[in-house]
Image: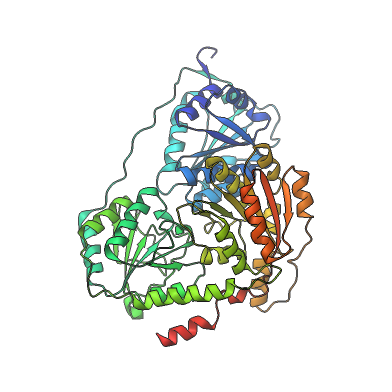
């Protein structure tokens, strides 16, 4: 077919119709038709990265910030396999993303099986939708479907494979318009059940999870808390949904069990679990009637609860979460018999415990002190993007999140290597806000080459590297399990010179006081900054200590 629109041009037109702003990636030979078509787009910007994994992390973070599908591009074979971690990151973390990968011609082979993998089958288990384009006529419907599925609850990754010969076809097809969709509202009877359980409770509590991290949900939850005075806790992925300076905030469930926040939840006889996602273990354990029972659990989410051995809620309110919370708020009459004194006492004790730890200004830097310094340096709307490591627990637990999506951490796939790319994307989406990547030395080196990308893009970004020359979290767990200290230490480059070699500005922390000075200087100065900060993880066990046991006895 020679008439009509070239398929790769049509694909770009479809992406433009979806509102695509960026495509992140590393093109290859099999993408050249697509790349040529993209070069003529006046609406979509290509962001060339140094590794496909970083491109995927950036696309997923775009989805997390905007609610719109982030788009990334790779070639076939090794380019596509490099997307696997990012695909899992987006799907488990609830971030809408579309991956576009190239492929050899499917109608006539020209190179045997060179570089050819079944990428669609590979992507199937870690995406919501994976499809090979076999006809240019179907491009509009498949692109529309990939975006629709990526963005509907629970958001996640989708994948389209565009073979060379399909990209070079011509077609009379045209892009499809986006449809307007509203989520179903929760059933009134289920809302009434939930309200009745709350009004009859003595000490109800809210648990805010990953699925609640949506703009309208945040607004409705705040109104609900203000009306009822009900205290709330968050999971790691629920941080910032409500300003954590709120007097009814009980803490973040950064640890699996045994923390101050878990003791506060144990005092509750009715738990409202909002936006629960099975990728985050709930910060409480349910018991069935044969085990003595436990608190009434109300599940509020867009989807029914996935039952597992520790989670089988009694009441489910299913529908748009913001609307469900609004319905409950409108119906509920706050009870004069509710009591939250013990819960709030645990929170006060946790803050006192944190104050004592963060006052330790040793060098190398003690993690609680570092968390406090970073919080003091960042404005309320500043964004920190964490890699994965033991410091993630210190930040989740001790860093006060003032707004949604200002603490980007991964408690779903919990991958290393995402901190720098997610911070780069944050700086692109919000160029007027302060952005900091906080990485362990191990995680940073997994995608450190993207410093060049950040410099090339002219981003304003601070990269704080917590340097202990080891895979510190696993080393800590190795010690706690009684194993010998072995196999987890390494050498690092001179990070200051490393940053400078990419055209970034390098700094090294020399004392606790110097850290505060460097943070202020880097955040106030345009450009890409890297701070090499030696840390002391020798007392990670102080995350918890005897304080909580003594308080439990007193209460």
In the picture, the quarter occupied by the C terminus is: bottom left
Check the image and tell me how it is coloured.
Answer: rainbow
User: In the rendered view, does 534 fall on the left or right side of 237?
Assistant: right
Which residue is depicted at the point 70% across and 58% down? 442
Residue 471 visible in rendering: yes
Which residue is depicted at the point 35% across and 52% down? 219
Residue 128 visible in rendering: no
Direction top: furthest residue: 3
Against 254, residue 507 (above or below) is above
Name the residue nearer the viewer: 517 or 101. Answer: 517
Name the residue nearer the viewer: 430 or 490. Answer: 430
Name the residue nearer the viewer: 234 or 362. Answer: 362
Which residue is depicted at the point 32% across and 45% down? 183
User: In the rendered view, does 408 fall on the left or right side of 481?
Assistant: left
Number of marks in picture: 0
Q: Quadrant of residue 190?
A: bottom left
Q: Position of residue 310 (x, y in %)?
A: 41, 70
Q: Position of residue 407 (x, y in %)?
A: 52, 55
Against 26, residue 107 (above or below) is above
Which residue is depicted at the point 35% across and 49% down? 216
Name the residue nearer the viewer: 206 or 78. Answer: 206
Against 457, residue 64 (above or below) is below
Q: Position of residue 534 (x, y in %)?
A: 71, 64
User: In the rendered view, does 410 fall on the left or right side of 511?
Assistant: left
Q: Position of residue 131 (x, y in %)?
A: 51, 37
Direction bottom: furthest residue: 553
């Amino acid at each position: 077919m020679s008439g009509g629109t070239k398929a790769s041009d049509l694909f770009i037109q479809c992406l433009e119709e979806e509102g695509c702003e960026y495509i992140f990636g590393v093109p290859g030979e099999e993408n050249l038709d697509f790349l040529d078509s993209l070069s003529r787009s006046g609406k979509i910007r290509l962001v060339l990265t140094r590794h496909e994994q970083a491109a995927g992390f950036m696309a997923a973070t775009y989805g997390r910030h905007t609610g719109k599908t982030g788009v990334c591009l790779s070639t076939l074979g090794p380019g596509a396999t490099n997307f696997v971690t990012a695909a899992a990151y987006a799907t488990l973390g609830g971030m809408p993303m579309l991956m576009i990968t190239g492929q050899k011609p499917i109608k006539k082979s020209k190179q045997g099986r060179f570089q050819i993998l079944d990428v669609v089958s590979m992507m199937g288990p870690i995406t919501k939708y994976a499809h090979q384009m076999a006809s240019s006529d179907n491009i509009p419907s498949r692109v529309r479907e990939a975006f629709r599925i990526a963005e509907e609850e629970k958001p996640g990754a989708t994948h389209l494979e565009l073979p060379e010969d399909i990209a070079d076809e011509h077609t009379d097809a045209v892009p499809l318009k986006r449809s307007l969709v509203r989520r179903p509202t929760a059933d009134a009877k289920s809302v009434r059940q939930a309200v009745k359980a709350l009004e009859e409770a003595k000490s109800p509590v809210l648990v805010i999870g990953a699925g609640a991290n949506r703009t309208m949900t945040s607004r409705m939850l705040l109104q609900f808390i203000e009306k009822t005075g009900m205290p709330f806790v968050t999971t790691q992925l629920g941080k910032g949904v409500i300003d954590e300076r709120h007097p009814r905030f009980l803490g973040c469930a950064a640890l699996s069990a045994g923390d101050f926040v878990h003791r506060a939840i144990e005092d509750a006889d009715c738990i409202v679990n909002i936006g629960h996602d099975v990728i985050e273990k709930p910060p409480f354990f349910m018991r069935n009637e044969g085990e003595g029972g436990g608190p009434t659990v109300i599940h509020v989410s867009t989807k029914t609860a996935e039952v597992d051995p520790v989670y089988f809620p009694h009441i489910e309110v299913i529908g748009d979460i913001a609307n469900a919370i609004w319905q409950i708020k409108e119906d509920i009459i706050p009870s004069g018999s509710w009591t939250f004194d013990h819960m709030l006492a645990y929170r006060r004790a946790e803050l006192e415990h944190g104050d004592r730890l963060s006052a330790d200004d040793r060098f190398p830097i003690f993690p609680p002190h570092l968390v406090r310094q970073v919080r003091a340096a960042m404005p309320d709307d500043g964004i920190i993007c964490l890699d994965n490591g033991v410091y993630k627990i210190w930040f989740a637990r001790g860093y006060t999140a003032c707004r949604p999506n200002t603490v980007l951490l991964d408690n779903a796939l919990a991958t290393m290597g995402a901190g720098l790319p997610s911070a780069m994307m944050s700086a692109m989406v919000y160029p007027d806000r302060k952005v900091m990547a906080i990485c362990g030395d191990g995680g940073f080196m997994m995608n450190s080459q993207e410093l060049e990308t950040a410099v090339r893009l002219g981003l304003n970004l601070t990269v704080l590297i917590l340097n202990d020359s080891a895979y510190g979290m696993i080393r800590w767990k190795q010690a706690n399990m009684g194993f010998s200290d072995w196999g987890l230490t390494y050498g690092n480059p001179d990070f200051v010179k490393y940053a400078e070699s990419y055209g970034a500005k390098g700094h090294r922390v020399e004392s606790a006081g110097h850290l505060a000075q460097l943070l202020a200087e880097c955040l106030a100065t345009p450009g890409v900054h890297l701070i090499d900060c030696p840390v002391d993880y020798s007392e990670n066990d102080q995350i918890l200590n005897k304080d909580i046991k003594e308080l439990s006895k007193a209460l």
